[in-house]
Amino acid sequence: MGIFDRFRRAPEVKESAGYRLHYQHVAPAVWSKRNYAAFADEAYIRNVVAYRAIKRIEDAVASVPWMVWQGDEELTTHPLKDLLATPNPSQGGSEFWGAMAGFYMIAGNAYLERVLVQGTPKELWTLRPDRMKVLQGETGLASGYLYKVGQQEHRWDADPITGDSDVRHLKAFHPVDDWYGLSPVEAGAYSVDQHNESMSWMQALLQNSARPSGALAVKDDRELSDDQFNRLKVEVQEQYSGSKNAGRPMILEGGLQWQAMGLSPSDMGIIEGKHSAARDVCLAFGVPPQLLGIPGDNTYSNYAEARQAFWEDTVIPLVKYFASEINAWLSPYFEGAVIKPDFDQIEAIAEKRREMWAMGNKSMELTVDEVREMKGYEPLGGEKGKMLMADLRKGQPKEPDETPSEKAWRIAYG
């Protein structure tokens, strides 16, 4: 009997009507309607702002240390902890988490594969989203996953009741797609395109002597001969175009004059438009523009506040989501052991936590157990746990070299 057989429902039990409906009259396999290759090329490969925003999220997720808990006990050594530290022969733990976050931010989907040896997960792999195909099942859940590279394919089946499979599909919420997640790149596609176009425009301007486009006009309705036209064309391309020829004066003869036929960067507001598009790209990924050095955004008063907001609003929710998905997927194989992120070691948010702890130590209304809970400790219980921090401070003599916060800490935690 399989490990999930005990969760199977009897045939007479009704299934979700909504989930059953959304697979009817639809082909058994659905390809993503979005183009992952275009997202990766236009955003991650060609757009410096999108690349840096995604890379910032990758690095942040990869830097989070992980703990393994069995019930109320933290385990210093455990097979699950070893698996996450070295998920496969090609990736270490940090690279594994970073790749997962990168795929998720570019595609809105991330796929993980577990390799079982004698019924125990021994390896974890990240799979490219553009090669994966979700197969629909009759219960409204995926019946399997198909991975295709060239002409070769591999299929993993999924349990029709529990959805368990050797592939775990992590997807961002999509309001109009039942099977694939919404990519942040798609939400910010216009801004990515605008930023790319502004950079292309500026590059073309630099390659054409940093002047707006224009034309050489002949006075008095005269016409140039073919030889004169070809000679002039070659001379302009070789001597007056490109960054190396920027600023070189043009010598006109034969009644020629230059007529501008475009707007200057200042006329078009191209620079500000580029910065505005860059800020919108950051908005799509949840990265404060200040962290990427983009001018014109004063949401946060300083870099430290922006970094703290980045962790609290973007990284921490994403890491918690990854943890919940992996726990639901792997925990049954490790006797209920679960992974938890250790945010106490993240310096970006440690300062705010220290401030909260100091406020708890100085509180007049909080009890000892409430302060301990704030700091992540188990409650003491009993009369001491119910005592107010203010009463503890009053009932103890002040040590000559102790601050009030240090004294309250000593009383509460010994």
Image (spheres, rainbow, N blue to C red):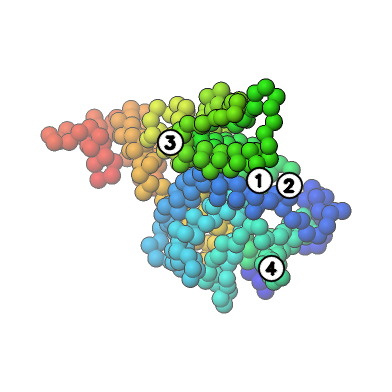
- The mark lying in front, picked from 4 and 2, is 4
Whole-percent x and y of residue 351? Answer: 34, 38
Displayed quadrant of residue 375: top left
The residue to which callout 2 is attached is 177
Nearer the N terminus, badge 2 or badge 1?
2
What amino acid is found at the position of numbered circle 2 in the picture? Answer: Asp
Give the answer, above or below, for where 339 lies relative to 195.
below
Query: Quick one: SS at disc 3?
Result: loop
**In-image side of 337 versus 179 (left or right):** left
Residue at horizontal 56 percent and vertical 62 percent from the top: 126
Disc ID at residue 293 = 3
Q: Is residue 283 shown to the viewer in this render?
A: no
Badge 4: few (under 14), some or many (20 or more) residues near its Cα, within 10 Å? Answer: few
Q: Do the CB atoms of the residues marked 4 and 3 lie less than 8 Å apart?
A: no
How many angstroms separate mark 1 from mark 3 (CA)? 27 Å
Q: Which residue is at 49% across, 56% downward?
A: 97
In the picture, the disc for residue 409 is none
Bin the neighbour count of mark 3 within 10 Å (Cα to Cα): few under 14, some 14-19, many 20 and up: few
Q: Name the residue under label 1.
A: 182
Q: Mark 4 points at which residue?
A: 150
Which quadrant is the N terminus positioned in? bottom right
Toward the left, the furthest residue is 400
For marks 2 and 1, give the CA distance.
Answer: 8 Å
Q: Are there few (<14), some (14-19), or many (20+) residues within 10 Å of tag 2? A: few
Question: At label 4, which amino acid type do we have?
Answer: Gly
